[in-house]
Image (cartoon, rainbow, N blue to C red):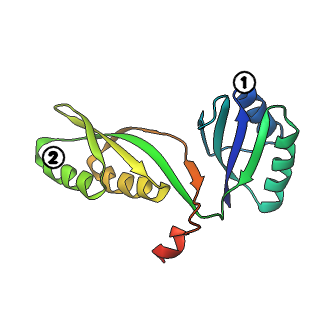
Amino acid sequence: MKHTLSVLVEDESGVLTRIAGLFARRSFNIDSLAVGPTEKTGISRITMVVPSDHRTIEQLTNQLYKLVNILKVQDITHLPSVERELMLIKINSDPEHRSEILDIVKIFRAKVVDLSENSFIIEVTGDPGKMCAIEQVLSKFGIIEIARTGKISLIRDSKVNSEYLRA
């Protein structure tokens, strides 16, 4: 199972290296990693997606707390949260398929950010499922390149779990 960890750290050089080193020493892969400043000066949030079981995540959490500059580690996998990713996808766009591609872009509430004679670059933001879906639909036109950010996530104070609303 994939777990989403939210880690608050002091914004110091080498913190990310120490965290990555901890995971590497224990032979754990990080599927997704996003780092950015928080609302408080000098504090950054690291959001990472790690494939592992619950017991191992607990062990990793305990190990993370032993590192200098770690303020808070939270497994937010099963908590109601808002998750987003950003993807840029460059696809082939011959003139006969342009209107079909633009219809798909509109349906997914994405936007075209670059256009050339032979390609589109499309910007998509949303949950990981949306990223997968639009990539699958656009693949028939020929994907040239993809760049994705890691997942970012914040816990919902409303406690509304949108996963249950989809079912």
Please give left or right for residue 28 compared with residue 110 in the image.
right
Which-is-in-front pick, marks 1 and 2? 1
Of the residues shown, which amino acid type is indicated by label 1?
Glu
Q: Nearer the viewer, residue 127 or 24?
A: 127
What residue is shown at x 55% (from left), y 69% (from top)? 161
Q: Is residue 145 left or right of residue 48?
A: left
Q: Which residue is mark 1?
A: 12
Q: Residue at x 36, y 41 (%)?
A: 89
Residue denoted by label 2: 98
The amino acid on which the numbered mark 2 sits, given as a three-letter code, is Arg
**Coordinates of residue 39 in the picture (x, y in percent):** 59, 38
- Badge 1, how many Cα within 10 Å: few under 14, some, many 20+? few
C-alpha distance separating marks 1 and 2 = 47 Å
Q: Is residue 37 above or below residue 99?
A: above
Q: Quick one: quadrant of the N terminus?
A: bottom right
Badge number at residue 30: none
Q: Residue at x 63, y 30 (%)?
A: 41
